[in-house]
Amino acid sequence: MKFLHTSDLHIGKKLDGITRLDEQREVLGEIVSIAREREVDAVIISGDVFDTFIPSAEAEAAFYDFAAELSDKKRAVIVISGNHDDEDRLFASGVLALKNGIFFCGRDNAFPKMQVGNVKIIDSGRYFIELSDGKDNIRLGTVPYFSDAPKGEIVDKDEGYGDRAKRIFSEALGSGDECKILVAHFFMLGGVPTSGERAVDLGGARVIAPSAIPEDCKYAALGHLHRRQVVLKARNIIYSGSPMQYSYDEAGTEKSVTIFETDGKEVKNIEIVPIKNGKRLVEISCLGIENADEAVGRYADDYVSLTIRSDRPLALEETKGLKERFPNITQIKLVVTKMTADGRIIGRKHLSDEELFKGYFEARYGAPPEDDVMQTYLEIMSEE
């Protein structure tokens, strides 16, 4: 049986206020094309379908269009919720989705036995759904994100978060001899987060060790971290990563989906398939605003975070004009530095308090501060 693993679609997510819904539709369409071209039997979406608990109507429409095309009643689509999703809202269309071979999975799965393409749903229940292609039986443990405890479960104060996850993972995968795959949305120890993820580990309290995953699990299809990464290669504990770059610390990273196959009770032929659509996020810098146009002009098709190193503060009109000329600039960072006569940077730390304040005041108000304002500032700075 052949699977496609993706996660963290974050449909509706914006970049510094800029909508990316058209890009997302293109990327989702590319995932559909990959699933069809590679003749995938089932698709796993490991949470964070949407970016907010209450997504826009446009974002919901984009997902439902995508899910229907992805399944096309020829492949099963397995979806769990992530920390950005409202599980109840996401699962509200479950009855209609089921008719299209789309299965919203979580704690209480109760799906009829049915055929979707080459895959038959032969069983389902608490945290699991079992598939068969007539040769292999695959048990998918489906564990959506939970903060303290899954919905409907009373928190045992004597049971730590990691122990709770371990217990639920074990229950989800069961004790049978089927090929076992875990589908989960958590922060696994060894994973590397980016600024695009919502902080959910609370100082490490919600980080789960790979040892929490049962030894007989053949592949852990994880969601939550946006960079594709293998937490433990020997056990196929893998984050597929988001299919788009969502934060600037993902600049330079290739986006992809992961395809793998099952053979009897083993997983084989794990393959990374790159995603080509979606704009890149690039971080660039230049020396002085007079060089910004040339620097940014090379990246007209990308979103840009621009750092300007300057020997003076910039007026608002200067940065505003730059953004008007290049709407793809989403961030402008100014680093005020002191320079030598030949243009070498000395650094802002060498500027005095007086120089820093004068530069800020002039940039903010368009004129240097009056003597009495300057004197008041220096008196305040000298107070202990």
Image: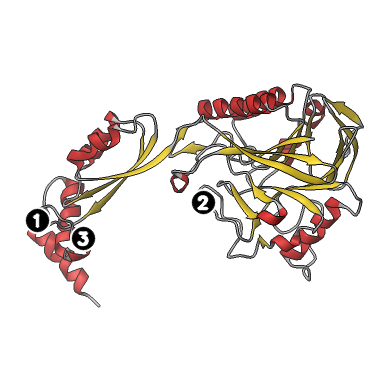
Q: Residue at x 22, y 75 (%)?
A: 383
Mark closer to the chain start, 2 or 1: 2
- Work out how far the residue at label 3 is from the one at label 2, CA to CA, in angstroms: 28 Å
- Work out how far the residue at label 2 is from the one at label 1, CA to CA, in angstroms: 45 Å
Q: Residue at x 59, y 44 (%)?
A: 241
Q: Which element carries disc 3, helix, strand or loop? A: loop
Q: Position of residue 29 (x, y in %)?
A: 60, 25
Q: Position of residue 271 (x, y in %)?
A: 65, 39
- Residue labelled with disc 3: 347
- Residue labelled with disc 2: 194
- Is residue 271 positioned above or below 382 on the image? above
Q: Residue at x 89, y 35 (%)?
A: 135
Q: Quadrant of the N terminus?
A: top right
Number of the front mark, 2 or 1: 2
Q: Position of residue 283 (x, y in %)?
A: 36, 44
User: What kind of residue is marked 2?
Assistant: Thr
- Residue labelled with disc 1: 370
Q: Residues within 10 Å of mark 1 (few under 14, many from 20)?
A: few
Question: Left or right: 271 with respect to 179?
Answer: left
Specify whether residue 108 is in view: no
Q: Position of residue 54 (x, y in %)?
A: 62, 37
- Is residue 140 positioned above or below 350 on the image? above
User: What kind of residue is marked 3?
Assistant: Gly
Q: Residues within 10 Å of mark 2 (few under 14, many from 20)?
A: some
Number of the front mark, 1 or 3: 3
Residue 104 falls in which quadrant of the image?
top right
